[in-house]
Image (tube, rainbow, N blue to C red):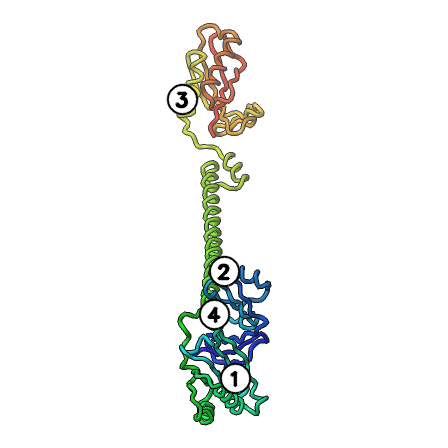
Amino acid sequence: MANLMVINRQGVLYDDRTRGDVLALYIPSREQVRRYADLTNPNIRTVKEQYGTIEQTPLWRQEGEAVTVYGLLPAELFERRTSVEVFLPEDFAPLGTSALFYVFSDQLIVHAVRTVADNGLASWGSSRLDPKRHGGLLNALVEAVSDRLLEGTAERILVAVHGEEHFYDQIRQVLDPFRVDLVRFDSLQKNLDKEPLYAHRDYSLWMLSTVVFAGLLVLLAIGYFLFSMYELKQAETKVAAIQAELSRLQSDTRLGNLANPKEVLNALGKPLKQRPSAIVHAVAEVAATFGNLEAVELSQEDTSSRSASRRQGPKLSATMPGTLEVLATVKVDGTPGLLVDQERVALAAFESRPWVRYIQREGGNNSDTLKLRIGVQIE
């Protein structure tokens, strides 16, 4: 059941306030009706321009080659979110009807009359009857029907009532003596060849669906953003952990699990425990480059003081930490050679054996022997 309304240039005259789509009947006034025969491909924009309105919506229909504008749509209907269709009263008149009366309440009667011009073209004129001026609804309706019948023209008169059952029964009783077609307005059908003067569809469900869809998109975007931020944090945490592990591995490779520099220095200050045989072999190899090796002995003398006192065990050099001093005696076959030659041999020993820290001649050498103090790096 549609929400039935009656409107004119002044606004809404009747509204039964039924929920649902709006079906409105428009009562045009002669001052507003315009006919345009020079409009090709008419649309709402061109009709607005031709009719001279910008803000309001014209109620128009193309009839043959001409376009007829019957008036302007009230703003109240334009702003309705439900579907709205606007028709003329005669659009619901059955075929052959010459006059009609639509009764919508005890305050409103819509009257329309069909006339035929000399050229054979038929047209309708509609108006609003005010029952108050004729002593009430029933008196006004009886007078209007009587006037049509007194004209003596054989015509079909339609009376359609929209209202409660008791209201319909009252009208049926007073119109019973007259030859009129009395029906309920709900039983009338719109002529199929009549297009609405104005129509817009119910977009509320579509708009609601659009809003819900847009809301879902926003929620998805927010969720994706939060999930991306979470994954980014997780990735940053993993990268930091990998970098920390890489730094630890590099530190372990360089420092042997020592992260404190003081601990590293302490570790470097501790002597490496080399076997004496390895030290003697290394020194003998160096001393043999100067001549025939006769003897090798580990020094028991403190090299920092050269004291004559005997000490227990070999001593590290005080001037070069981590270096062990070894005495070697070499036979040189009658001549120790020039100092330049000895320095050349010593330089060659340094270059080929990086663990040799220094080589010193011992005082008191005779003509056929050479005593050397050789410092060996053992740490």
Tag 2 or tag 1, which sits nearer the N-term? 2
Which of the 4 image quarters holds residue 194?
bottom left
Question: What residue is disc 4 on?
Answer: 119
Tag 3 or tag 1, which sits nearer the N-term? 1
Q: Amino acid at mark 1?
A: Ile
Across and down, in percent, residue 144 comes to: 52, 87
Q: Amino acid at mark 2?
A: Pro
Residue 24 visible in the snapshot: no
Give the spatial CA distance, label 3 vs label 2: 117 Å
Please give the label number shown on residue 42. Answer: 2
Please give the label number shown on residue 109. Answer: 1
Q: Residues within 10 Å of mark 2 (few under 14, many from 20)?
A: some
Where disc 3 sits, the SS reads helix
Please give the label number shown on residue 281. Answer: 3
Give the spatial CA distance, label 2 vs label 4: 26 Å
Where disc 4 sits, the SS reads loop
Q: Which tag is nearer the camera, tag 4 or tag 3?
A: 4
Q: Are marks 4 and 3 in contact (CB under 8 Å)?
A: no
Tag 1 or tag 4, which sits nearer the N-term? 1
